[in-house]
Each structure stands twice: as structure tokens, then as C-alpha cells.
Amino acid sequence: MKKHLIVASLAALIVSSAFAGKPGDVGVSLEFGGLKSDATAKVDGISSDGDIHTTYEALRAGKYFDFGRIGGSLGYINEDDGTDGKFVAINYDYMFYNKSQFTPFVGASVAYNWNEANYNIKHNGLTYGPEVGVVYDVTKEVELELGARYLKSNVDGSKNVSGHRVSLDVDSSVQYYMAIGYKF
């Protein structure tokens, strides 16, 4: 019995290390997430702070290297709470490679956003910040990823609406996401 347990443990270790993301792998994935942005709206200089809650989808592509993972994404922010938009992003993640199917990572993300809020107020700008997560290799080709990002922002915009100056400034955002990917 003890011998079978040792053989089974070694087989599990060998199989799980075969699934771990490897340098040289190239992948594409679909990312689905939610975000909460801290924003300030002003009308004629009178301000109100609030949160914008919405969801988003992104198409991602990237490559694994010895030193981590580099990738990019194109995304769409769904129209919730009166705002919607698009973004393009690049990211770098340091991958904590190991012999299990779980690979944690820490990294950084930079994105440019094109957004539109109520009254057609366009608020565009840069977001940037750290990200953390874990990649789970389901098979040699398929991976699932869970992660979170904290993004500072210089996204802002303003417009005259019925003779009143209306502006919107997004200070920061928190994103939580899940992605499913395929590695070549």
C-alpha cells in the first residue's frame, strides 16, 4: 500500500509539472471581469464623489519568458451606471514558476481608455497599476486565470450641457477578473 502511494504521488508530481506554463508558450485568452471606479462628477464647479460599477470583456494575447509573461489586450467596458468604453492595455507579470498546476504572479498593467458617460461626456485617459493573480493549468493547452488590478487613473472629460459645465474625473479603479486561455 505504501509503495502504491509513493508511486501515485510521484506520478501526480510529474503530471502536474508537465502542465505548468513554460517559457516559450504563446497564448490567447478571453477575460471577463468587473470593475469599480472611484469618480468625481462636477456641474458648474459643484462636485459629488461616487462609484461606477460595471463589467468588461477583453481579448488577450501574450508570451511566457524565463523572466515572466508579457501581454496585451483589447477590451470593451459594458454600459452600466451610464458609462461605457473601450481600452487597449499592455502588461508584464513575474511568474512564480513551480512544479504544480498553480502559478501565482505579480505584475503591472498600463492601459488607455476611451469612455463615454451620460450626456455624451467623453472621458479618456491612461490607467496604470499593479496586478496579482494565479494561473491554473487545466491541461497542457488550457489555462484558467483569476486576478485583480488596482489602477490609478488620469481619465477625465468635460462638456457643456444645457449651459452648464459638466465634468467627470476617474481617480482609480479596482478590477477583478477571470480569464480562460489557450496556449500554443
Image (tube, helix red, strand yellow):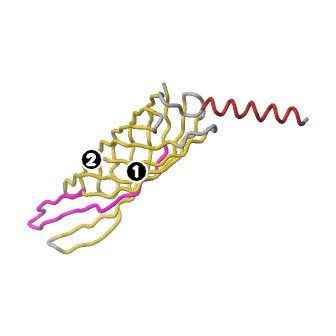
Q: List x then y, in percent, for residue 80.
A: 35, 54
Q: List x then y, in percent, for residue 162.
A: 11, 64
Q: List x then y, in percent, for residue 76.
A: 33, 43
Q: Quadrant of residue 9?
A: top right
Q: Residues within 10 Å of mark 1 (few under 14, many from 20)?
A: some
Residue at 18%, 70% (x, y): give it.
43
**Residue at the outermost front position:** 67
Is residue 121 shown left or right of residue 52?
A: left
Is residue 110 shown left or right of residue 161?
A: right
Residue at 21%, 58% (x, y): give it.
156
Which of disc 1 and disc 2 is earlier in sequence? 1
Q: Which mark is residue 138?
A: none
Residue at 47%, 27% (x, y): give it.
24
Quote the CA–CA distance across marks 2 and 1. 17 Å
- Quarter of the image with the N terminus is top right
Q: Which mark is residue 112?
A: 2
Given residues 46 and 139, the one toward you in this image is 139
Amino acid type of disc 2?
Tyr
Q: Which mark is residue 55?
A: 1
Residue stretch in magenta: 155-178
Residue mark closest to the camera, 2 vs 1: 2
Magenta highlight on residue 169: yes
Magenta highlight on residue 30: no
**Predominant secondary structure, magenta span:** strand
- Asked whether the residues under the numbered discs 2 and 1 touch, taking CB atoms below 8 Å apart as contact, a structural biologist would say no
Q: Residues within 10 Å of mark 2 (few under 14, many from 20)?
A: some
Q: Quadrant of residue 141?
A: top right
**Residue at the outermost right position:** 1
Amino acid type of disc 1?
Thr
